[in-house]
Amino acid sequence: MSPGYILAGVLVGVLVGLTGVGGGSLMTPLLVFLFNFNPVVAVGTDLLFAALTKSVGVAVHHRAHGSVNWKVAGRLSLGSIPASLVTLYVLSLYENLGKDLSRPITMVLGVALLLTAGALCIKQRVRDWGRRLPRGVVRLIGEKRKITTIAIGAFLGALVTLSSVGAGALGTVAILLLYPGLPAVGVVGTDLAYAIPLTSVAGLGHLLLGNVNWGLLGALLIGSVPGIWAGSLVSARIPERVLRPIVATVLAAVALKCLAS
């Protein structure tokens, strides 16, 4: 259990506490490029890490705020869980054939990071746009959004299983687009609620495929808990409009490195 891994957990925890961005967007690239972990192992370990840390978050949101919209979370899960299982099955076929998945996983990670960076940049605009929608448009979206929510869940399920990235920022933007009437705390709580079964299924699937490093997982958890606590305390003093563009720029730069490597 390297002190460097614990420090990485602290760093990512602080950033998550500051910005609310999912740990996968920050942790997986860190493990791949700084600590030279195989991308598949980095993704598998980070998925279990996310499942455990998000469980704490959703418990707080549900008990303290009652902010989870379980109907929306269920629709997203209805798409994401089957998609995750299918993706894990395809990964197992490739691994049984002896295929090296490092390059494909790194490419998907790059795409996911670019999408996440974009989602961070437009999140507030999407929220404002949703509030100004005419009632007729809202009703039209309502007629189609059940199927659309399931379809978006399926896309996120495959993406998260392959890269561990996307459940946070992309899920939040999707909920904002489809359910503009949800309050901000409800969007966050609902996003956390659907992400738990997704990251749990994907993480356990990677565990069965042998893609989880238990020592690394323990070190990340030890570091992330105080990191998230410290970041949350400081977050109120740093404007979100300052933090999000910085994080988005970092994610975009890492994404380009993934795609070019």
Image (cartoon, rainbow, N blue to C red):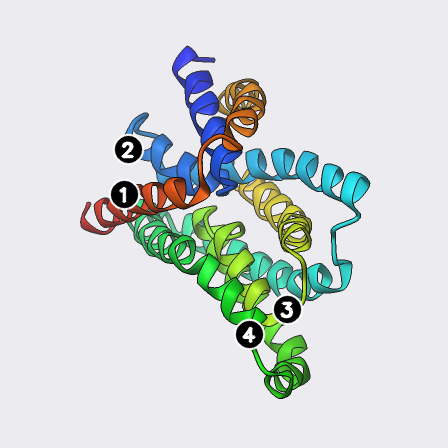
The disc, 4 or 2, on the residue closer to the chain's N-terminal end is: 2
Check disc 2 and report the residue beneath it: 33
The disc, 4 or 3, on the residue closer to the chain's N-terminal end is: 4
- Figure quadrant of the C terminus: top left
Spatial separation of the CA atoms under disc 2 and disc 1? 9 Å
Find residue 34 and report its horizontal and vertical position in percent.
Answer: 29, 27
Spatial separation of the CA atoms under disc 3 and disc 2? 37 Å
Q: Nearer the viewer, mark 4 or mark 3?
A: 4
Find residue 61 and report its horizontal and vertical position in percent.
Answer: 73, 42
In the rendered image, the vertical position of residue 230 relative to residue 154, given as above or below:
above
In front of the other: 115 or 155: 115
Check disc 1 and report the residue beneath it: 254
Check disc 3 and report the residue beneath it: 179
Q: Which mark is residue 210?
A: none
Residue 26 visible, this orientation: yes
Left or right: where 152 falls relative to 142: left
Mark 2 residue element: helix
Q: Which mark is residue 132?
A: 4
Find residue 192 and report its horizontal and vertical position in percent.
Answer: 64, 48
In front of the other: 65 or 171: 65
The disc, 3 or 2, on the residue closer to the chain's N-terminal end is: 2
Spatial separation of the CA atoms under disc 4 and disc 1? 34 Å
Spatial separation of the CA atoms under disc 4 and disc 3? 13 Å
Callout 1 crowding tier (Cα within 10 Å): few <14, some 14–19, many ≥20: many
The disc, 4 or 1, on the residue closer to the chain's N-terminal end is: 4
Callout 2 crowding tier (Cα within 10 Å): few <14, some 14–19, many ≥20: some
Q: Nearer the viewer, mark 4 or mark 1?
A: 4
Residue 212 visible, this orientation: no
